[in-house]
Each structure stands twice: as C-alpha cells, then as structure tokens.
Image: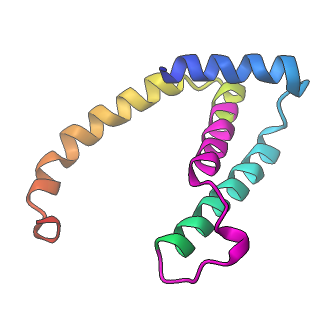
Amino acid sequence: MSITVAQEQVDTWIKEHGVRYFNELTNMAQLTEEVGEVARIIARRYGEQSEKDSDKSKDLGEELADVMFVVLCLANQTGVDLQQAFDKKLELKTKRDHDRHHNNKKLK
C-alpha cells in the first residue's frame, strides 16, 4: 500500500468513525504517547531493562501502527502529502548518505 492510500484510508476512517480529527496539539501529544509506548517495548525487550510481566504481551507492531496512524492524521490535517515528502527524503538520504555509511568503519 502506498502512503497516499494510507492517508486516504485514515481520512475515510476519521470521517466515518472518528467524527473529526483531534486538533494538531492533541495529535502531537498522542504521537508522543504512542512513541513512548514503542520506546518502552524496545527498552525492555531489546535493551538492558528487564521486561515486566505486564509488558510481555505488548505487540510492537501494533504500537508502531499506532504511531503511523497518528503521523498520517497529522499529515492529513496539515495538508502534507506524506508520499511526496517521503520520496523526497529518501532521495536526499540516498544521495547524502550512501558513501558516508559505506565508509563508516563502525558499520563494518
């Protein structure tokens, strides 16, 4: 699925089930909360913190999808074509970072 289609699906969902978008500040707070949930799973499952029993059933994919949903909401309500922005960013990173990463001794 393209990012454009994902943005359209989120917009349709908001109109059919969500009544309206939360305002941008509320969505920014939501995004921060969702990223925090991802960070908690990563820190405990893959980092050095011990994983609590209550965290073991958390689904990383579901939490990442929550982050993606809120990002798509923010893009929609601020008029950002995220597909275009992502494509542009990937092109920039490809040009800028290709040699840098290949020449990074830490990555070998």
Instruction: Please state if 74 lies on the left or on the right of 41 as rendered.
Output: right
Helix, strand or loop for the magenta stretch, by majority: helix
Residue 44 lies, in percent from the top left, at 56, 75
Quadrant including the C terminus: bottom left
Position above or below: 61 against 51: above
Position above or below: 71 against 46: above
Magenta span covers which residues? 47-73
Residue 7 lies, in percent from the top left, at 62, 22
Q: Nearer the viewer, residue 64 or 93?
A: 64
Residue 26 lies, in percent from the top left, at 82, 46
Residue 51 part of the magenta segment: yes
Q: Nearer the viewer, residue 66 or 45?
A: 45
Q: How many marks?
A: 0
Q: Nearer the viewer, residue 100 or 107?
A: 107
Instruction: Please state if 46 lies on the left or on the right of 101 as rendered.
Output: right
Residue 107 lies, in percent from the top left, at 16, 65
Residue 86 part of the magenta segment: no
Q: What colouring method underlies this structural image?
A: rainbow
**Residue for point 68% across, 69% down:** 55
Give the residue furthest to the right: 19
Give the quadrant of residue 72: top right
Give the quadrant of residue 74: top right
**Residue for point 58% across, 54% down:** 60
**Residue for point 73% across, 71% down:** 54
